[in-house]
Amino acid sequence: MHPARIGLVVLLAALLVAGAQAMRSNGEKTNQAAGQTTDIEMENPDPTALTIQPDIPSLKDVFAGDFKLGTAIPVSAITSQDGPDAQLLIKHFNSITAENELKWDATEPREGQFDFTRADPIVKFAVNNGIGLRGHTLVWHSQTPDWVFHDEAGNLVSKEVLFARMKQHIQTVAGRYKGQIYAWDVVNEVLEPGDHAPGGLRNSLWYQIAGEEYIEKAFIYAREVDPNAKLFINDYNTNMPDKRQDLYDLIKRLKDKGIPVDGVGHQTHIGIEYPSVQELDDMVTAFRDLAIEQQITEMDMSIYTNDVDAYDTFPLDLQIKQAKRYQAIFDVFRKHKDQVNSVTIWGKDDGNTWLRSFPVNRNNWPLLFDERLQAKYAYWALVDPDRVPEETSQAADSATHSGVWQVCHDEEANPTEGVVAPENAGCFADRLQPNTR
Ligand code: G3I
């Protein structure tokens, strides 16, 4: 190519890059739906330079009279037993959940071949530091290897074979950590009203092979192997009246049969606007007469109301709005502290949230500490609300936004690639009408 032409191409390329840079501005939306191709750099701080704030109040102490205060971690968070991540965990939390390391695909990837190399360090860290441990999760339709449900020919196995495989898994995994785990998510996300199965049960392979009985068996096996662990049924969107009623009815059926269900886990993956504080209050109230424990097991608060907006940085008005919302919701948890005995935030800091890759790859700031392990306004709202500025007028404008946030999961979607299955795309799209469920 003629040198002059090369120079022109280089100049054009430089102009294109400069143009893209100019489009970005702090806090300004980069609307991917409009086909704008601005890449959003994730904020990945230099991990060696992180330090925690040693002199701010410890969250676990702030809530000592109310409930355990927990978080979820990947095993990478404790590679260094005394690094800043470990220091943050030890200072602020008295409960830990392994984000992925105790799931079936991690602990028994092939039949009878168990692997605890990722789970053991988390359990050891919790035990060595006197931190409670929530086990997540024994029976789930996702992150469960295909071999569990199929024979060598690829056909679905019988109920008897499935139960034998489940029993071996639960006996081995829950047995290994007997006495070290105070609560197990025995079954996870067993309801899906959209599947239109009886009782709102999810039409998973578990259900297709064994019906509702698989849930009963999971609790029976778990109780047999660790009589002191509290056994939970865990799900998301348990604030939504239809699903909430399905869950209530299921727990009542199980308890009426003498199945050892000790508690209900409300995942509580919520947005900056939905669900309302009142709906979360009603959620806890709805289960009170079942005489079971209640735990908030996976709380995070996305700053978006849809799956197309994306911010380069966390706008101040949304920081304040998020803080006030965390404060109001924790006031509800405190109101029900006779029922709610553990609240887990699904991630220790904004640099470690699944919401930066689900439903799409984008910045998100759903937690209490930022990427540099510093306390956010959301933290101060729980500790010293006077430290949180008053909401700005811009926040008031966005409060009129009628978007409805409904968390849907499609485990077939690969969150790391930001691919949301088409049938789920609507779950994250902004909706004109409030959810009428
Ligand atoms: O370990 C592999 C790694 O080897 C591979 O290179 C990488 C890229 O493909 O993927 C890694 O596995 C990822 C795993 O997290 C561990 O990082 C999976 O792809 C990814 O899908 C998985 O996401 C987890 C998600 O559950 C799976 O459904 C999230 O971290 C985790 O926060 C999320 O947690 C769930 C709860 O268990 C149940 N409630 C909903 C909640 C959010 O989906």
Image (cartoon, rainbow, N blue to C red):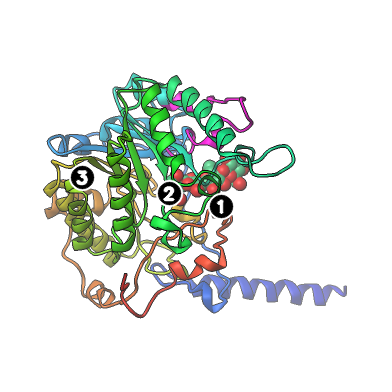
Proximity of marks 3 and 1: CB atoms separated by less than 8 Å: no
Q: In this view, does 297 lie above or below 226?
A: below
Query: What amino acid is found at the position of numbered circle 1 in the picture?
Result: Thr
Earlier sequence position, callout 1 versus callout 2: 2
Query: What amino acid is found at the position of numbered circle 3 in the picture?
Result: Leu
**Quadrant hosting residue 282:** bottom left
Instruction: Locate residue 431, reporting x and y percent.
Output: 38, 76
Tag 2 residue: 190
Q: In this view, does 120 lie above or below 238?
A: above
The answer for how far apart the CA atoms under marks 1 and 2 are is: 23 Å
As helix, strand or loop, the secondary structure at mark 3 comes to helix
Magenta-drawn stretch contains 116:
yes
What segment carries the magenta color? 98-122
Tag 1 residue: 416
Between 163 and 238, the one nearer to me in the picture: 163
**Quadrant hosting residue 112:** top right
Query: What amino acid is found at the position of numbered circle 2 in the picture?
Result: Val
Proximity of marks 1 and 2: CB atoms separated by less than 8 Å: no
**Ligand 1 within 8 Å of the CB at mark 1:** yes
Earlier sequence position, callout 2 versus callout 3: 2
Tag 3 residue: 290
Magenta-drawn stretch contains 42:
no
